[in-house]
Amino acid sequence: MTFKFAAIAAGCVLAPQLAAAQAGPTWIEAPSAADMAAAYPAKAKAAGVGGTVELSCTINREGRPRSCGVLKEPPGNYAFGTAARRVAEKLRANEANLRNQDVMIPVTFNPEVLKGDGVTITKPAWVAMPGIQDFQATFPKTANGVNSVRVVLACTVQTDGGLGDCAVDSEEPPGQGYGQGALALAFKFRVGPWSQDGQPTLGAKLKLPIRYALTQAAGKN
C-alpha cells in the first residue's frame, strides 16, 4: 500500500506558502521587550492593563515608519496610541518597494513584558522553515499503522530569530519517536523580530505545532 506524505507546521504545508500568507512588511529591526516595557504607559502599567494599537504609517527611504496615525487603541484613555508611535520608530522594513508607501502596523502591549522574563507569542512571522524533504527525513520509518501525528514543541526565540531550548510539549501518539523527530527540525525554523500581532519576539516563548499526515495515494495499493 502506498501513502502520500504531508507535513504541516504552524498551519501550512510548505514554508513559501506560509510566508506568502503573512501580511505586512518583513521587519528586519524591531523594538525589544525592554523598549516595550520602557514605553508602556504609566497608567496602564499601574493597572496591569494590556492594549492593542493599529497604526497607519509611511515608510521612509531608510525603511522606518514615520508620520504614524492611530487608527485604533483599545482600551481607550491609557495613551497606548502615543506609546505605540514611539516604539514603531524602531522598526525597519526590508522591502525597498515599500518606500513612501503607507502600511498598517499592529502594536500589542502585553503586561507580560513588564515582568522581564519573556512574553509568550502566538503569531510569529516566520522567515525560514524546513522543507518537505526535511520533514520526511525526520519522520520515523517504522510502519506502525499511524496515519496522523501531532507534535507541539515549546521553544524560546534566540537573538538571531532561531528557536532554542526546545522541548516536546505534547506528542500524539506518544512514545513512537515523533517528538524527537520534530525536535531535530527545530533549528531550521526562524522568526522575524516582530510578530504578526505586533510584539517583540527575541527572547519570547512560543508553541510550535507540527502535524504529519499520511493518506493512501489514489490508485495505489
Image (cartoon, rainbow, N blue to C red):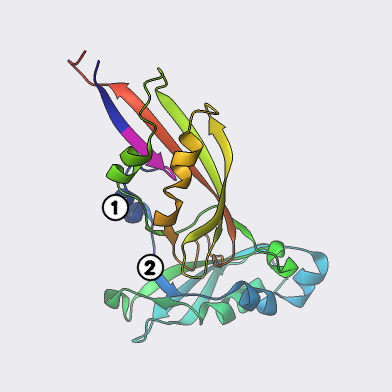
Q: Quadrant of the N terminus?
A: top left
Residue on which the image places disc 2: 26
Q: Of the residues tagged 1 and 2, which is closer to the observer?
A: 1
The picture quadrant where one finds residue 148 is top left
Residue positioned 50% across, 58% down in the render = 163
Residue positioned 38% across, 25% down in the render = 142
Asked if residue 196 shows in the view, the reply is no
Question: In this rendering, would 86 be left or right of 3?
Answer: right
| Residue 140 screen position, x and y as percent | 39, 32
| Residue 180 screen position, x and y as percent | 49, 40
Say the numbered circle drawn on residue 140. Answer: none
- Name above or below for residue 5 compared with residue 143: below
Q: Which secondary structure lies at badge 1?
A: helix
Q: Identity of the amino acid at label 2?
A: Thr
Mark 1 closeness class: few <14, some 14–19, many ≥20 residues within 10 Å: some
| Residue 5 screen position, x and y as percent | 30, 31
- Name above or below for residue 214 compared with residue 83: above
Q: Could you tell which of marks 1 and 2 lies nearer the N-terminus?
A: 1
Say the numbered circle drawn on residue 16. Answer: 1
Asked if residue 165 shows in the view, the reply is yes
| Residue 89 screen position, x and y as percent | 51, 82
Task: Identify the main secondary structure in magenta.
Answer: strand
Disc 1 from disc 2: Cα separation: 14 Å
Mark 2 closeness class: few <14, some 14–19, many ≥20 residues within 10 Å: many
What residue range appears in magenta? 6-11
Which residue lies most toward the bottom here? 61
The question of residue 10 being in magenta is answered with yes
- Name above or below for residue 219 compared with residue 115: above
Residue positioned 55% across, 67% down in the render = 202
Q: Identity of the amino acid at label 1?
A: Pro
